[in-house]
Amino acid sequence: MNTSTYTFHIHLCRAFCLLIVGIVFLIPGLGNCAEKAETLIVTAEGLADPNAEVYKKDKGMMIDDLRRDAQRQAIEKAVGVYVESNTLVENYLLIEDKVLSKSKGLIKQILEQSSPRLGEDGLMHIQIKAEVFISEVKTALQSLSRENRLSLIKERGNPTISVAVVVRDAKRSSDDVPENSSIADNILKEHFVNFGYRVWSEAYTKLLQQDAGGTKNNRRIADFSVIGEAKFKQTSITLKASGIQVTKHVLTSWTVKCINNHTGEEIYFNNKVPKNRAWADEDQALEDIGKLIGEEFTKDFFESQLMKPSQRYQIELAGLPDYDTALLFKDEFVGLRNILNAELINFETNGLSQFEVECTSSGGNFAQIVNSTILKPLNAKLDGPQLKLMSQHGNVVRISIDAGSQPGLIGKSMQNSPPASLATASPERINKLIQDKDLRDKVSQMNPDLEASNSDAIKN
């Protein structure tokens, strides 16, 4: 092959490669194939009734069903990111048929899987950690909503934001309380209102945070607080021609931070030392400061925070009698629908044991979530001992255990009673899952929806 022919082939190959790249980016959807799909790591528990007649002849079928149930629970937790629990239960059969049963397409991979075990509650248990295609779950739910004209996906609402910008300068002592700038506040508020958001009073938000974590009389604190501080110094120069003294307000630094008031997390913070920024009067300077701080925040910033699929919290449980009981609570947390992952990070006998939990993000107050979706099913499970929410500070909640006169009963009650997850499970899942009559009676005591559905079935 001569040189000119070889060169021609090289150019032809390059042109072909460029053509392929162009096709990938020009054809809708094809360019997205190379993008990494959004996933969510979920820990879930699968259950099976070993007393079911069908398993007596084939134990392998029970293990298969056990794993299948764990995978469906992983997807159900992912569904819980977008769908309220009561909506999921009310539309369970439809969601199960169109979404929960699609584990092969919605689960990317199984990262961990425990060995099957027979619990003292009479059920077979297995835990898995799965990577779920969260974006695919949302797409499936949106399609289901359109096809059946249902409002499945929960409304997040627009973020509410409180604002406070304070000012310091050489005239104001560092020991003085910083002065709030109404001018900068109002400019910043206008910036957020233009996004279509509502603006909350920062003083009102602080008052509610000090009073029962912002839940008194069901009044809401702002979702986010934007706090800014500007520092000035004054410089004076005398004009030689006229002898007139001119005073300038020079901005020496400014800081800004944004706090998620539901978790206490500082989701944004920044310090800036500007150069050559000076104003003839302080009001004009503060007006520009409001604009500068506003430029730090876009509409997508707040919406992406509210739409995060999960949030991390810490649960402090006071009064656990031993380490084994702490592990039992961790397993119970894993089974609950709104808890995606749970870890025991510190343990102390009869002291504070700490769990880190990752929960489906609701944009609401975590204390309310704990009461309704964690304590309520756990207290329905426990026979005697009861859990009580004591406090919430940011993303940390403290729960106490009233163990009664026999603390040792906590562990026994945890082991012998059906999983707390069944207290909020749909009647359809329970009816398919549990065949043993005594076990069904125990679950009925925990789950009023099951008892009601069974009564309706008898009437019909």
Image (spheres, rainbow, N blue to C red):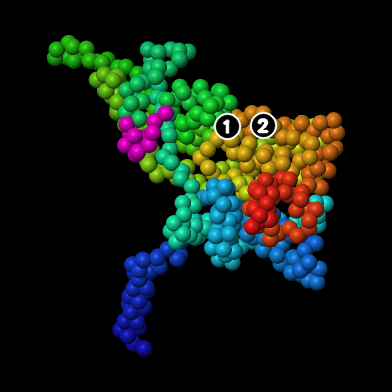
Left or right, residue 161 beside residue 119: left
Q: Horizontal placement of 257 versus 421: left or right?
A: left
Pinpoint residue 34: horizontal percent, then vertical percent: 45, 64
Is residue 211 placed above or below 70 in the rendered structure? above
State which quadrant residue 4 falls in. bottom left
- Looking at the rendered image, the quarter that the C terminus falls into is bottom right
Q: Position of residue 426 (x, y in %)?
A: 63, 53
Residue 389 disc label? 2
Residue beneath the point at 47% across and 34% down: 223
Mark 2 neighbour density, 10 Å: few (under 14) some (14–19) many (20 or more): some
- Residue tagged 1: 394
Check whether the beta carbons of the residues at disc 1 and disc 2 lie within 8 A of each other. no
Residue at 36% of width from left, 32% of height from top? Answer: 293
Specify whether residue 347 is in view. yes
Where residue 39 sits, quadrant-wise, is bottom right
Q: Which amino acid is tagged 2? A: Leu
Magenta stretch, residue numbers:
190-200
27 and 172: which one is in front?
Answer: 27
Q: Nearer the viewer, residue 261 or 399?
A: 399
Q: Is residue 317 magenta?
A: no
Secondary structure under tag 1 reads loop
Q: CA distance from mark 1 to mark 2?
A: 14 Å
Q: Residues within 10 Å of mark 1 (few under 14, many from 20)?
A: some
Q: Secondary structure at mark 2?
A: strand
What amino acid is found at the position of numbered circle 1 in the picture? Gly
Location of the N terminus by quadrant is bottom left
Observer-nearest residue: 314 or 89? 89
At 59% from the left edge and 44% from the top edge, which residue is drawn? 359
The numbered mark at residue 27 is: none
Q: Residue at x 61, y 30 (%)?
A: 392
With respect to residue 446, does 385 lie above or below?
above
Residue 341: tell me if it is visible.
Answer: no
